[in-house]
Image: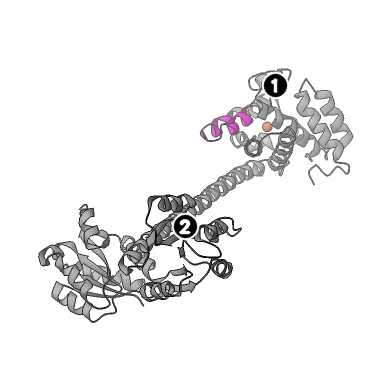
Amino acid sequence: MLKILMIDDDTINNRIAESTLRNHNYEIVSVTSCEEGLRRLSEGGMDLLLLDIDMLHEAGDSLIEEIRRQPGNENMRVVFLTISGYSPDQKEMERLGVVDYIGKPYFEEELVNIVRRVLYVEHENRILVVDDEMMNLMLAKKLLSTHYQVQCVSSGGEALTVLEQSVPNLILLDLHMPDMNGLSVLKRMQESDNQDIRNIPVIFLTADGDKETEAEIFKAGAMDYIQKPLVAQVAVERINRILELRYLQNSLQTEVEQKTKELEESSRKIKNLSMQIMYALTGAVDAKDQYTNGHSNRVARYSREIARRMGKSKKEIDNIFCAALLHDVGKIGVPDEIINKPSKLTDEEYEIMKSHPVIGANILRRISELPELSVGARWHHERYDGKGYPDGLKGEEIKEIARIIGVADAYDAMSSNRSYRDALPQDYIRREIEKGKGTQFDPEIADIMLQLIDEDTDYHMREH
Ligand SMILES: [Fe+2]
């Protein structure tokens, strides 16, 4: 378990941090004085120090130097605790080797993120060192093993073989090697089919510090270079900087993926909910009319198929489907005894029945996200020759969506059972649609309906 020391005289803050970090499986010790902190650190075993910046200022900057002089604490990671809204001086942080800061009071998540990031960089990373000189490999292993899991290989070819088996978090790559030099190894990595290999950050190890080499290294795609012979503190700082950058990139990507997933999930839920509400409304309409059970659903399915054959986009097809589903919603406002009257309607009753498109359009007008709904409801009883209702629109004055629903609606009226008759024969319906081309129906849409009828050889497309 990773161990954290917290030096802060704010005991309330200490208690909150203790419980937060323990919940995330860190061991935490908190002390309220710098002397006590130094003593605990000297006992060794601490992986991270959370240090109140005011207490440091009281004790003096030399406190951090004193900590780093302690055996085993040379590279102690330090995070400042400050007051929210106060950013410590960046230069001061760099000079003291403080890796980050967090303002109090903080959210639990903020504290855990900072601790995880800082500790991750030091403890969970595997570094592959590639160098043809044994002395260099031994030195690298000795200096870096206290911070990372280190694997050493002595040639570029060997490195590429190792990468095929497992991918390290970072590679320290010698620039000059006899068989395959560092730049060739990097090039081979960049050409790999494995994205993980292409993404491994590479730091070159080089003895030449000239500008041309530096330019060449960065041009090749390396993240950094370190001069040989290795100096532990410099190497660890530069490696950590790159690991931290990579960690942040990965976290950001994970967060983006997570948020995208959440967004997709909630948009899927909203879509489902909308569909369920529409089906519920449709059910309410169909329930009122005992002789046209399932009428709205069938009209919606026929309209969708017509729209698909007209080459409409997925979104348009979906909208037409929804509009057709709700085209008769205005019947909610027509008395039951008129809708279900078994005998012929009187003129007055017929006028009331004819009000359903307007009632429907008024109900659906409030759904501003889908204006197609009220269009379909209002004009599905218009006729191509202008003799329909409620507005007597003609030809292309009638919105296409309503012309589609109009054809599908008429087809279903004829192919479903009524109180006074069964579904009409298919060839009769076919003739009626043919006859209505250009008078009742848009001729092109009627042709598509005829196509559907002709393909429906066993007259499956009717109310069962
Ligand atoms: Fe209708």
Q: Nearer the viewer, residue 432 or 145?
A: 145
Q: Nearer the viewer, residue 262 or 101?
A: 101
User: Do the CB atoms of the residues marked 1 and 2 lie less than 8 Å apart?
Assistant: no
Question: Which residue of the protein is positioned furthest toward the left in this rendering?
Answer: 58
Residue at 22 percent across and 52 percent down: it is 85
Residue at the image point whose x is 26% and y is 59% from the top = 102
Query: Which residue carries the number 2 mark?
Result: 254
Q: Residue 11: in sight, yes or no?
A: no
Q: Position of residue 157 (x, y in %)?
A: 57, 67
- Depicted 218 relative to depicted 324: above or below: below
Residue matched to label 1: 388
The image quadrant that residue 326 belongs to is top right
Report which quarter residue 391 is drawn in: top right
User: What secondary structure characterizes most of the magenta part?
Assistant: helix
Seen from the viewer's position, the closer of residues 204 and 434 is 204
Q: Which of labels 1 and 2 is toward the front?
A: 2
Residue drawn at point x = 38 percent, y = 63 percent = 239
**In the image: residue 80, left or right of residue 326:** left
Mark 1 belongs to which amino acid? Gly
- Label 1: element kind: loop
Identify the secondary structure beneath mark 2. Answer: helix
Residue 113 falls left or right of residue 316:
left
Q: Is residue 453 left or right of residue 177?
A: right
Bounds of the magenta segment: 361-378
Q: Position of residue 376 (x, y in %)?
A: 63, 31
Here the colouring is one colour
Q: Residues within 10 Å of mark 2 (few under 14, many from 20)?
A: few
Mark on residue 12? Answer: none
Q: Amino acid at mark 2?
A: Thr
- Point out the quarter of the image occupied by ligand 1: top right
Q: Earlier in the sequence, mark 1 or mark 2?
A: 2
